[in-house]
Image (cartoon, helix red, strand yellow):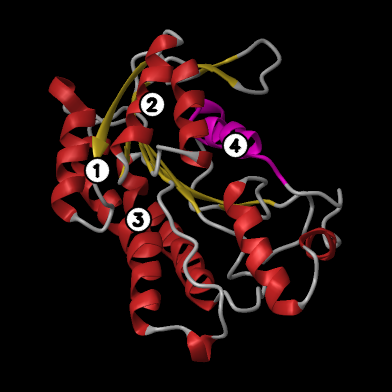
Amino acid sequence: MAELNPNGSSPTGFAGLRAVVTGGGQGIGAAIARGLARRGAHVVVSGRREATLEAVSAAITAAGGSADYCVGDVTDPEHLEQLMALAAGSSGVIDILVNNAGISGPTAPLAEVTLADWNETLAVNLTGVFLACRAALPYLERAEHGKIVNIGSVTGKQPLLNRTPYAAAKLGVVGLTRTLAHELGPSGINVNVISPWLVGGERLENVLGTMARQRGLSADDLRAEMTAGTAFKRTVSEEDIVEMTLFLCSTAAGNITGQDINLSAGAVMY
């Protein structure tokens, strides 16, 4: 497992470890995959778009890392079985599973949310985490110190108008994480969830744009309103999530499990 650097603040190496990152073709997932690979892990990314997965894998390899990819949907149990087998390889071991795959879902009042949109949002954002964990467990149990990191959201712990399917799914990930941590404690597997708030990037801009139009505000005014409750009055970055993921996968976090960690620039969440 990872060693610490001399000042003890962050992991410096995951050499020999095998990691899976779902939703790894872009955004947060791609950034996490690159971070794990920089520390020496062999990383397998999954997602629905082969071109983006291939690009991430190729970039990691070109930078001197080790990566592969597997195309498919986290709502498909057969894909997840293939993904985990590919990641484990001949060793039969997966050391790290990062459940990042997710969709924004609809931005609309509940009365206007279709059943199809509701079901799709929960299927990807919550059921997909369940299915990926279930498929990875036989391999994680063979690891010396298995790690599961679920990427959740502050949404669900704080009201966010017109985002009920997404909020319900992400709060469900917190309950799944807490319970699974106790189930897997005897196997020495850590299970935690990172709940970011307002992660800068294309997805946030799209959501803010839709919400701003619905409320008759500019996107800048809405961003200022939403960051007002943070201590730093700002959004967080993908790299913030990468660094927290690396910490949770290191030996420094060996006694941290079942936790819901808010990355919120100081906004208080429960």
Q: Position of residue 248 (x, y in %)?
A: 53, 36
Q: Label 3 is placed on what type of residue?
A: Val
Specify whether 262 is left or right of 66: right
Q: Label 4 is placed on what type of residue?
A: Met
Q: Position of residue 101 (x, y in %)?
A: 40, 50
Q: Which mark is residue 136?
A: 1
The answer to whether residue 96 is seen in the rendering is no
User: Residue beneath label 2, please?
Assistant: 55
> Dot 3 surroundings within 10 Å: few (below 14), some, or many (20 or more)?
many
> Dot 2 surroundings within 10 Å: few (below 14), some, or many (20 or more)?
some
Residue at point 21% right, 38% down?
83
Of label 1 and label 2, which has the lower sequence position? 2
Q: Nearer the viewer, mark 4 or mark 2?
A: 2
The answer to whether residue 111 is seen in the rendering is yes
Is 173 situated above or below 144? below
Q: Which mark is residue 129?
A: 3
Residue 270, image quadrant: bottom right
